[in-house]
Image (cartoon, grey):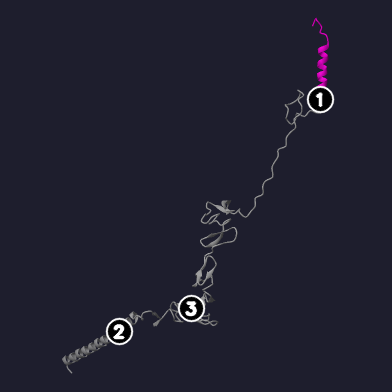
Amino acid sequence: MDGQRLDDLARNLARRSSRRRVLRGAAGGAAAAVMVRATARAGTETCAAGQTDCGGTCVNLQTDLANCGKCGTVCASGLVQVACIDGACVRTDCAAAQLSCGNVCIDPKSDPANCGACGTVCASGTCTNSVCVPVTSCAEGQLVCDGVCVDGCCDNDNCGACGNACTGGLTCFEGVCDCPSGDCDETTPTPAPTTTPTTPTLPSTGIGPAQGSPSSAVGPAALVAAAAAFGAAAIRSLKPRNPTQ
Protein backbone atom coordinates (compact mmCIF):
# COMPACT_ATOMS: atom_id res chain seq x y z
CA MET A 1 0.00 0.00 0.00
CA ASP A 2 1.51 3.26 -1.13
CA GLY A 3 1.52 6.42 0.96
CA GLN A 4 -1.33 8.10 -0.90
CA ARG A 5 -3.78 5.25 -0.37
CA LEU A 6 -2.79 5.04 3.29
CA ASP A 7 -3.59 8.72 3.79
CA ASP A 8 -7.00 8.32 2.11
CA LEU A 9 -7.90 5.38 4.35
CA ALA A 10 -6.96 7.32 7.48
CA ARG A 11 -9.12 10.26 6.46
CA ASN A 12 -12.14 7.97 5.81
CA LEU A 13 -11.81 6.32 9.22
CA ALA A 14 -11.58 9.72 10.91
CA ARG A 15 -14.72 10.94 9.17
CA ARG A 16 -16.66 7.81 10.16
CA SER A 17 -15.55 8.11 13.82
CA SER A 18 -16.59 11.75 13.92
CA ARG A 19 -20.02 10.90 12.51
CA ARG A 20 -20.53 8.24 15.18
CA ARG A 21 -19.69 10.71 17.97
CA VAL A 22 -22.07 13.26 16.51
CA LEU A 23 -24.88 10.71 16.29
CA ARG A 24 -24.29 9.53 19.85
CA GLY A 25 -24.30 13.12 21.13
CA ALA A 26 -27.50 13.91 19.28
CA ALA A 27 -29.21 10.83 20.66
CA GLY A 28 -28.14 11.69 24.20
CA GLY A 29 -29.36 15.26 23.88
CA ALA A 30 -32.76 14.15 22.63
CA ALA A 31 -33.16 11.75 25.55
CA ALA A 32 -32.24 14.47 28.03
CA ALA A 33 -34.74 16.84 26.47
CA VAL A 34 -37.47 14.22 26.77
CA MET A 35 -36.66 13.73 30.47
CA VAL A 36 -36.66 17.49 31.14
CA ARG A 37 -40.03 17.88 29.42
CA ALA A 38 -41.46 14.97 31.42
CA THR A 39 -40.16 16.41 34.68
CA ALA A 40 -41.54 19.83 33.83
CA ARG A 41 -44.94 18.37 33.10
CA ALA A 42 -44.94 16.49 36.42
CA GLY A 43 -43.94 19.64 38.34
CA THR A 44 -46.50 21.89 36.74
CA GLU A 45 -49.36 19.42 36.77
CA THR A 46 -52.15 20.70 39.06
CA CYS A 47 -54.68 18.74 41.09
CA ALA A 48 -58.41 19.00 40.67
CA ALA A 49 -60.32 21.80 42.33
CA GLY A 50 -60.49 21.33 46.12
CA GLN A 51 -57.42 19.08 46.20
CA THR A 52 -53.79 19.68 47.13
CA ASP A 53 -50.61 17.99 45.94
CA CYS A 54 -49.02 16.32 48.97
CA GLY A 55 -45.83 14.48 47.99
CA GLY A 56 -47.06 13.83 44.45
CA THR A 57 -50.54 12.72 45.52
CA CYS A 58 -53.64 14.86 45.17
CA VAL A 59 -55.63 14.85 48.42
CA ASN A 60 -58.53 16.75 50.00
CA LEU A 61 -57.18 18.48 53.08
CA GLN A 62 -60.70 18.89 54.44
CA THR A 63 -61.32 15.15 54.77
CA ASP A 64 -58.03 13.25 54.36
CA LEU A 65 -57.02 11.49 57.60
CA ALA A 66 -53.34 11.45 56.62
CA ASN A 67 -53.33 15.11 55.58
CA CYS A 68 -55.97 16.81 57.70
CA GLY A 69 -55.85 20.58 57.30
CA LYS A 70 -52.34 20.49 55.80
CA CYS A 71 -49.98 17.99 54.25
CA GLY A 72 -48.56 15.49 56.73
CA THR A 73 -51.04 16.17 59.57
CA VAL A 74 -52.39 12.76 60.59
CA CYS A 75 -55.81 12.50 62.23
CA ALA A 76 -55.85 9.37 64.41
CA SER A 77 -56.74 8.28 67.95
CA GLY A 78 -56.55 4.98 69.76
CA LEU A 79 -59.17 6.02 72.33
CA VAL A 80 -62.11 7.54 70.45
CA GLN A 81 -63.47 7.60 66.94
CA VAL A 82 -62.16 10.52 64.93
CA ALA A 83 -62.58 11.96 61.47
CA CYS A 84 -61.16 14.83 59.44
CA ILE A 85 -64.02 17.29 59.07
CA ASP A 86 -63.52 20.72 57.52
CA GLY A 87 -59.77 20.33 57.90
CA ALA A 88 -59.94 19.58 61.63
CA CYS A 89 -59.53 16.29 63.42
CA VAL A 90 -62.62 15.77 65.59
CA ARG A 91 -64.08 12.89 67.49
CA THR A 92 -67.16 11.31 65.97
CA ASP A 93 -68.52 9.30 68.88
CA CYS A 94 -70.49 12.26 70.36
CA ALA A 95 -74.26 12.05 70.52
CA ALA A 96 -76.25 13.35 67.59
CA ALA A 97 -77.13 16.63 69.36
CA GLN A 98 -73.59 17.26 70.58
CA LEU A 99 -70.48 18.86 69.13
CA SER A 100 -66.85 17.91 69.48
CA CYS A 101 -65.03 20.99 70.80
CA GLY A 102 -61.40 20.37 71.63
CA ASN A 103 -62.13 16.63 71.42
CA VAL A 104 -64.74 17.07 74.17
CA CYS A 105 -68.41 16.37 73.50
CA ILE A 106 -70.57 19.38 74.47
CA ASP A 107 -74.18 20.44 74.09
CA PRO A 108 -74.17 23.65 72.00
CA LYS A 109 -77.70 24.47 73.10
CA SER A 110 -76.78 25.03 76.74
CA ASP A 111 -72.97 25.24 77.03
CA PRO A 112 -72.10 28.91 77.86
CA ALA A 113 -68.50 28.31 76.71
CA ASN A 114 -69.59 26.88 73.34
CA CYS A 115 -73.02 28.35 72.75
CA GLY A 116 -74.25 27.35 69.28
CA ALA A 117 -70.69 26.75 68.08
CA CYS A 118 -67.29 25.85 69.47
CA GLY A 119 -65.61 28.82 71.16
CA THR A 120 -68.70 31.06 71.44
CA VAL A 121 -68.59 32.25 75.08
CA CYS A 122 -71.60 33.86 76.76
CA ALA A 123 -70.53 36.80 78.92
CA SER A 124 -73.73 36.44 80.90
CA GLY A 125 -72.95 32.80 81.62
CA THR A 126 -76.33 31.69 80.25
CA CYS A 127 -76.87 29.82 76.96
CA THR A 128 -80.40 28.87 75.96
CA ASN A 129 -81.26 27.15 72.67
CA SER A 130 -77.77 27.92 71.33
CA VAL A 131 -78.20 31.66 72.01
CA CYS A 132 -76.48 33.73 74.72
CA VAL A 133 -79.13 35.22 76.99
CA PRO A 134 -78.33 38.61 78.58
CA VAL A 135 -79.24 39.08 82.24
CA THR A 136 -82.00 41.50 83.20
CA SER A 137 -81.65 41.49 86.98
CA CYS A 138 -78.76 40.99 89.36
CA ALA A 139 -78.22 40.40 93.05
CA GLU A 140 -78.55 43.30 95.46
CA GLY A 141 -75.65 45.70 95.14
CA GLN A 142 -74.85 44.70 91.54
CA LEU A 143 -75.45 46.53 88.25
CA VAL A 144 -76.60 45.22 84.87
CA CYS A 145 -74.01 46.49 82.37
CA ASP A 146 -74.20 45.22 78.78
CA GLY A 147 -76.22 42.22 79.89
CA VAL A 148 -73.71 41.23 82.57
CA CYS A 149 -73.87 41.61 86.35
CA VAL A 150 -71.04 43.70 87.80
CA ASP A 151 -70.19 44.89 91.30
CA GLY A 152 -70.63 48.65 91.15
CA CYS A 153 -68.94 49.00 94.52
CA CYS A 154 -65.52 47.91 93.29
CA ASP A 155 -65.55 47.43 89.51
CA ASN A 156 -62.92 49.78 88.05
CA ASP A 157 -64.73 49.84 84.69
CA ASN A 158 -68.20 50.41 86.15
CA CYS A 159 -67.66 52.23 89.43
CA GLY A 160 -71.05 53.21 90.85
CA ALA A 161 -72.53 53.30 87.34
CA CYS A 162 -72.11 51.45 84.04
CA GLY A 163 -69.20 52.83 82.04
CA ASN A 164 -67.76 54.95 84.86
CA ALA A 165 -64.11 53.87 84.73
CA CYS A 166 -61.55 54.76 87.39
CA THR A 167 -58.38 56.25 85.91
CA GLY A 168 -55.30 58.09 87.10
CA GLY A 169 -54.24 55.37 89.54
CA LEU A 170 -57.52 55.45 91.47
CA THR A 171 -59.46 52.37 92.47
CA CYS A 172 -63.18 51.95 92.84
CA PHE A 173 -64.13 51.78 96.51
CA GLU A 174 -67.74 51.82 97.64
CA GLY A 175 -68.80 53.07 94.22
CA VAL A 176 -66.44 56.06 94.17
CA CYS A 177 -63.06 56.46 92.43
CA ASP A 178 -61.23 57.96 95.39
CA CYS A 179 -59.09 55.20 96.81
CA PRO A 180 -55.37 54.87 96.01
CA SER A 181 -54.61 51.74 94.04
CA GLY A 182 -53.87 48.76 96.24
CA ASP A 183 -55.30 50.16 99.52
CA CYS A 184 -58.99 49.45 98.96
CA ASP A 185 -59.04 46.17 100.79
CA GLU A 186 -57.40 47.60 103.91
CA THR A 187 -59.07 49.48 106.74
CA THR A 188 -57.12 52.53 107.89
CA PRO A 189 -57.52 53.01 111.66
CA THR A 190 -58.55 56.44 112.94
CA PRO A 191 -55.63 57.99 114.83
CA ALA A 192 -56.22 58.66 118.54
CA PRO A 193 -56.49 62.35 119.55
CA THR A 194 -53.31 63.83 120.94
CA THR A 195 -53.14 66.20 123.97
CA THR A 196 -50.38 68.65 124.93
CA PRO A 197 -49.56 68.83 128.67
CA THR A 198 -49.87 72.30 130.20
CA THR A 199 -47.82 73.90 133.03
CA PRO A 200 -49.90 75.36 135.88
CA THR A 201 -49.45 79.11 136.50
CA LEU A 202 -48.57 80.12 140.09
CA PRO A 203 -49.52 83.42 141.73
CA SER A 204 -46.99 86.18 141.13
CA THR A 205 -44.77 87.12 144.10
CA GLY A 206 -42.85 89.83 142.29
CA ILE A 207 -39.63 87.89 142.75
CA GLY A 208 -38.07 85.39 140.39
CA PRO A 209 -38.51 84.66 136.66
CA ALA A 210 -41.59 85.47 134.59
CA GLN A 211 -44.79 83.59 135.34
CA GLY A 212 -45.61 80.52 133.30
CA SER A 213 -41.99 79.45 132.79
CA PRO A 214 -40.88 76.08 134.13
CA SER A 215 -38.71 77.75 136.85
CA SER A 216 -41.50 80.02 138.19
CA ALA A 217 -42.45 77.59 140.91
CA VAL A 218 -40.93 79.00 144.16
CA GLY A 219 -39.83 76.63 146.90
CA PRO A 220 -40.13 77.19 150.71
CA ALA A 221 -36.46 78.25 151.10
CA ALA A 222 -36.82 80.93 148.49
CA LEU A 223 -39.95 82.27 150.22
CA VAL A 224 -38.14 82.45 153.58
CA ALA A 225 -35.18 84.29 152.04
CA ALA A 226 -37.48 86.74 150.35
CA ALA A 227 -39.37 87.42 153.59
CA ALA A 228 -36.10 88.03 155.50
CA ALA A 229 -34.87 90.49 152.91
CA PHE A 230 -38.18 92.34 153.02
CA GLY A 231 -38.06 92.60 156.86
CA ALA A 232 -34.49 93.92 156.87
CA ALA A 233 -35.41 96.63 154.43
CA ALA A 234 -38.38 97.67 156.56
CA ILE A 235 -36.20 97.94 159.74
CA ARG A 236 -33.65 100.14 157.99
CA SER A 237 -36.36 102.50 156.92
CA LEU A 238 -37.48 102.97 160.59
CA LYS A 239 -34.02 103.84 162.07
CA PRO A 240 -33.46 107.64 162.59
CA ARG A 241 -30.95 109.26 160.32
CA ASN A 242 -27.89 111.13 161.69
CA PRO A 243 -28.21 114.82 160.69
CA THR A 244 -24.48 115.12 160.33
CA GLN A 245 -24.34 112.42 157.81
The type of residue carrying mark 1 is Leu
In what element is the residue under mark 3? Answer: strand
Q: Is residue 90 something one can see in this rendering?
A: yes
Magenta-highlighted stretch: main secondary structure? helix
Residue 91 image point, x, y percent: 51, 79
Question: Where 17 sits versus 210, above or below?
Answer: below
Residue 157 image point, x, y percent: 53, 57
In the image, what residue occupies the spot 82% across and 17% down?
A: 232
Q: Residues within 10 Å of mark 3 (few under 14, many from 20)?
A: many
Q: Nearer the viewer, residue 126 or 24?
A: 126
Give the mark nearest the N terminus, 3 or 1.
Answer: 3
Residue highlighted by disc 1? 223
Q: Nearer the viewer, residue 237 or 136?
A: 136
Query: Any mark on residue 32, and which?
Result: 2
Residue 115 image point, x, y percent: 51, 71
Q: Is residue 113 something one can see in this rendering?
A: no
Distance in Å between CA atoms under marks 3 and 2: 45 Å
Q: Which residues are magenta?
A: 221-245
Q: Residues within 10 Å of mark 1 (few under 14, many from 20)?
A: few
Residue 240 image point, x, y percent: 83, 8
Quadrant occupied by the N terminus? bottom left
Query: Any mark on residue 89, and which?
Result: 3
**Cβ–Cβ under 8 Å for marks 3 and 2:** no
**Cβ–Cβ under 8 Å for marks 3 and 1:** no
Give the mark nearest the N terminus, 2 or 1.
Answer: 2
Is 10 positioned to the left or the right of 84 in the image? left
In the image, what residue occupies the spot 83% across and 12% down?
A: 238
Hey, which residue is sitting farthest top in the picture?
Answer: 244
The type of residue carrying mark 3 is Cys
Q: Nearer the viewer, residue 160 or 204?
A: 160
